[in-house]
Amino acid sequence: MRKGSAIKCGTVKNEMKNVATGEQSPNTRPMSRKAAAGEYMNPAQVEHFREMLTDWKQALMEEVERTVHHMQDEASNFPDPNDRATQEEEFALELRTRDRERKLIKKINESLMMLDSGDYGYCEICGGEIGIKRLEARPTATLCIDCKTLDEIKERQMG
């Protein structure tokens, strides 16, 4: 395990054993924000992530607008069934993409609310720091890498 990445709710080895046996770890309550306080998520970092999330949300919203206009402008009744099928498939693909982006916008809004409450950057399970590098890669992350790994292991075991 990397230095400084210990799970607050137990070691990875014990948690993996608990996952395999279906037991609940006795230490799964998040630690307080004061205990996790320090230079992590200082005001400059908070502002950086707020700007990053806001810009990302704005770009997604512009893409939604573009899609609506594209679908309105391109909607045609082609006489050829193959052309109609192609257009319908393109629209279906765009709508699936927009639905995924809609869910992402919801996560972005939740992250912005967490920034406002001071909970952004802390794991929902163990209360530990998620880490700046992880947040840079995935700004909507709500779990530290160790808890996310355990979550994925549990998910694979459940089916």
Image (cartoon, rainbow, N blue to C red):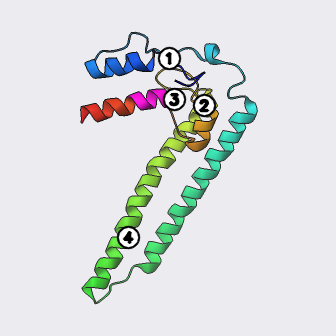
Q: Amino acid at mark 2?
A: Gly
Q: Are marks 1 and 3 in contact (CB under 8 Å)?
A: no
Mark 2 to mark 3 CA distance (whole Å)? 7 Å
Q: Are marks 2 and 3 in contact (CB under 8 Å)?
A: yes
Could you tell me residue 27's position as x and y percent?
Answer: 43, 11
The secondary structure type at the circle numbered 2 is loop
Q: Quadrant of residue 122?
A: top right
Mainly helix, strand or loop, the magenta region? Answer: helix
Please state which of residues 64 and 135 is positioned toward the viewer in this rendering: 135
Compare marks 4 and 2 and give the one earlier in the sequence.
4
Compare marks 2 and 3 and give the one earlier in the sequence.
2
Residue 131 is marked as: 2
**Which residue is rendered at x = 42% and y = 53% of the image?**
100
Residue stretch rendered in magenta on the structure: 144-150
The secondary structure type at the circle numbered 3 is loop
Could you tell me residue 72's position as x and y percent?
Answer: 44, 75
Q: Quadrant of residue 133?
A: top right
Q: How many marks?
A: 4
Q: Amino acid at mark 1?
A: Pro
Q: Quadrant of residue 21?
A: top left
Q: Which residue is mark 1?
A: 30
- Mark 3 neighbour class, 10 Å CA radius: few under 14, some 14 to 19, many 20 or more: many
Q: Which residue is mark 4?
A: 91
78 up-or-down from 43: above or below: below
Which of discs 1 and 2 lies nearer the camera? The answer is: 2
**Which residue is rendered at x = 32% and y = 29% of the image?**
154
132 in magenta: no
Mark 1 to mark 4 CA distance (whole Å)? 44 Å
Residue 144 is marked as: 3
Compare marks 1 and 2 and give the one earlier in the sequence.
1
